[in-house]
Image: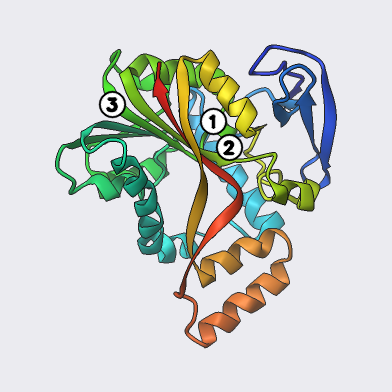
Amino acid sequence: MLKFVSCDLCGENRSELRYKIHKLNRHIVKCTKCGLCYVNPQEQQNLTYDFEDKRERLNRFQRMCELAAGRYGLCDEGIYAQEEEWRILHFADRADRILKFCTSGRLLDVGCSRGLFLSNFLNKKGFDIYGIEPRDWICAKAAKRLGNKVFCGTLREANLPDAHFDIVTMINLIEHLPSPRDTLLEVNRVMRQGALLVIETPDVEGFLTKIMGNRWYAFTESEHNFFFSKTTIRQLLSKTGFSAISIEPAYKLFTLRYLLYQTTRYNKAVSKFLVRLVESFRFSNKLIKFRQPGEMIIFAQKS
């Protein structure tokens, strides 16, 4: 069921249409008051699994996998399994950046997925790690890697204590949430004064967005509902009790196989051919690190 929503950042009802995503039958609008870009209308319960109905979370996840597989050829668990070792290395870059700010403490990863990021802290002394993941079977994969450090549910369901964490990370999560503002207020509650918040999210004002328009990868993800710029993410942080320290570019580490696999959203036949080609020449595990245009990492502090 679709529902028209107000701007999550400032509450304004007026907006202007920016892009139509025809394949997904979605409209990307821009708030006329604060400039936040978001999907409007939205499904009444967003396609993000971040709500308190476990059976419906599983049903929606399965539907999204079927939709992605049918439309783009994505959601291939075989590919994800092949890539886990390299994805852990990718997230090592995020871990190293955090270590520049904090060398110990309680670390919470909201939306930890398979636990690939948190696994970089398993053997680091001085860190007490904790993950939250609402999708049951993804959470089970994380628990195999991280043990009893994972809560299966939403942030509110976890009912964490006040002022408990020194570091909270939200990697490619905030764009999925039903209400980024409400979630950050809850994150603020569970953080100690002066604690570090790390957010990674697409940058809607990046040059790649201007070039690709409604074909920009962040717009074509059916689970994405909010699209921040450096300006609007700073506004959101300020309204929820944080102050930005720095906003940095995001570097991605991919195997050539995974990079080509991701292009299926644009042309499935060409992507599959290229994947088979690099595999035949045994180049599929070649690692490629590059600065990803259109993505940013935000470091902030609880005010």
For badge 2, the amino acid type reads Arg
Q: Residues within 10 Å of mark 2 (few under 14, many from 20)?
A: some
Q: Residues within 10 Å of mark 1 (few under 14, many from 20)?
A: few
Inspect this view and state whether residue 141 appears: no
Q: Are marks 2 and 1 in contact (CB under 8 Å)?
A: yes
Point 68% across, 44% down: residue:
206
Badge nearest the viewer, 3 or 2:
3
Numbered circle sitting on residue 189: none
Sequence order check: which comes first, mark 3 or mark 2? 2
Mark 2–mark 1 Cα distance, whole angstroms, equals 6 Å
Disc nearest the viewer among 1 and 3: 3
Where disc 2 sits, the SS reads helix
- Other-residue count near label 3 (Cα within 10 Å), few / some / many at <14 / 14–19 / ≥20: many
Please provide percent x and percent y for residue 274. Answer: 63, 77
Q: In the displayed structure, does residue 103 sit left or right of residue 67?
A: left
Give the camera-side residue of 229 and 150.
Answer: 229
Task: Check the picture and name the quadrant holding the C terminus.
Answer: top left
Question: Residue beneath label 1, please?
Answer: 56
Q: Residue at x 28, y 49 (%)?
A: 119
Horizontal side, residue 198 vs residue 46: left or right = left
Viewer-nearest residue: 76 or 122: 122
Q: Amino acid at mark 1?
A: Glu
C-alpha separation, residue under disc 1 versus residue under disc 3: 33 Å
What numbered label is drawn on residue 166? Answer: 3
Q: Which residue is mark 2?
A: 60
Q: Secondary structure at mark 3?
A: strand
Q: Is residue 149 depicted above or below 156 in this figure?
A: below
Residue depicted at 22% across the width and 38% down the height: 103
Q: Quadrant of the N terminus?
A: top right
Question: In the displayed structure, does residue 188 sit left or right of residue 218?
Answer: left
User: Could you tell me residue 229's position as x and y percent?
Assistant: 64, 34
